[in-house]
Amino acid sequence: MKTTVEVPATTKKANVKTKIIGLTGGIGSGKTTIANYIQSKGIPVYISDTEAKKVMEQPEIIAKINTTFNDDITTNNVLDRQKLANIVFNNPEKLKQLNAIVHPAVKIHFENWVKQNQNHPVIVKEAAILFESGSYKDCDVVISVITPLETRIERVVKRDSTTREKVLQRINNQLSDEQRIEKSDYIIKNESFEEAKKQTDQILNLL
């Protein structure tokens, strides 16, 4: 099993000055909290979900979504996210169509962000589906935030005012922690935020 301070097997990409760190974890793992902590240390962090929402507001992306899902997906040319979510939820084919529109645009957006921050020795890409989307390939090192299942469930139930059953359904639709550990260079065990911060600092010092 990988430890928090294990020297990564990943080799630096040739001719790349800025090291791109991938940060991921399952729902309720606290990866965004860790991302915010890293950002507070002056390291640029790209929050994929937030940036993807911005990309989806671009007129050309809205036009493509309209063409694919028909015009009633928008109101006054503003994307109705709830309506879109209802269409793609539990419909893999529709979700695939949406991802085919959004993911390439987000990839370009991220590449531009990297160029804007190329004066920093280390930058971070936070993404829930870092492995599933294939964007881990853009990273030199990957960190996964791992948290006990019951803690994750409690966090999300409280945060989203939802039910345990619905949270478990979302967790079961994601990679398991075991799969993330296997694919990652470093692991942050986020049972206590204070301990997680110490682990994060150790990893950043090695990078």
Image (cartoon, rainbow, N blue to C red):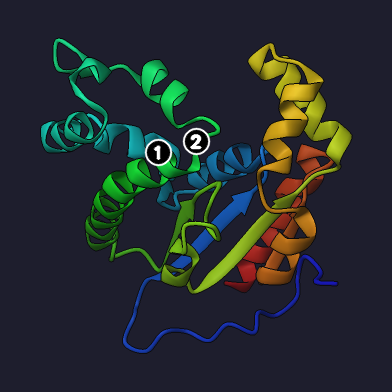
| x, y percent for residue 72 | 23, 15
Q: Is residue 86 above or below residue 138?
A: above
Residue at point 69%, 67% (across, down): 186
Nearer to us in this view, 85 or 120:
85
- Mark 2 is surrounded, within 10 Å at the Cα level, by few (under 14), some (14 to 19) or many (20 or more) other residues, namely few
Q: Quadrant of the C terminus?
A: bottom right
Residue at point 28%, 65% (across, down): 118
Q: Quadrant of the N terminus?
A: bottom right
Residue at point 49%, 65% (across, down): 136
Q: Quadrant of residue 123?
A: bottom left
Q: Are discs 1 and 2 less than 8 Å apart at CB?
A: yes
Q: Quadrant of residue 155?
A: top right
Q: Which residue is mark 2?
A: 91
Residue at point 22%, 29% (across, down): 57
Q: Quadrant of residue 32?
A: top right
Nearer to us in this view, 129 or 197:
129
Taking the image as shown, residue 37 lies to the left or right of residue 184, namely left
* Amino acid identity at mark 1: Lys
Q: Which residue is mark 1?
A: 94
- Mark 1 is surrounded, within 10 Å at the Cα level, by few (under 14), some (14 to 19) or many (20 or more) other residues, namely some
* Amino acid identity at mark 2: Asn
Taking the image as shown, residue 15 lies to the left or right of residue 50, namely left
Which element is circle 2 on?
loop
| x, y percent for residue 176 | 75, 53
Nearer to us in this view, 10 or 93:
93
Q: Is residue 86 above or below residue 194?
A: above
| x, y percent for residue 9 | 64, 84
Which element is circle 1 on?
helix
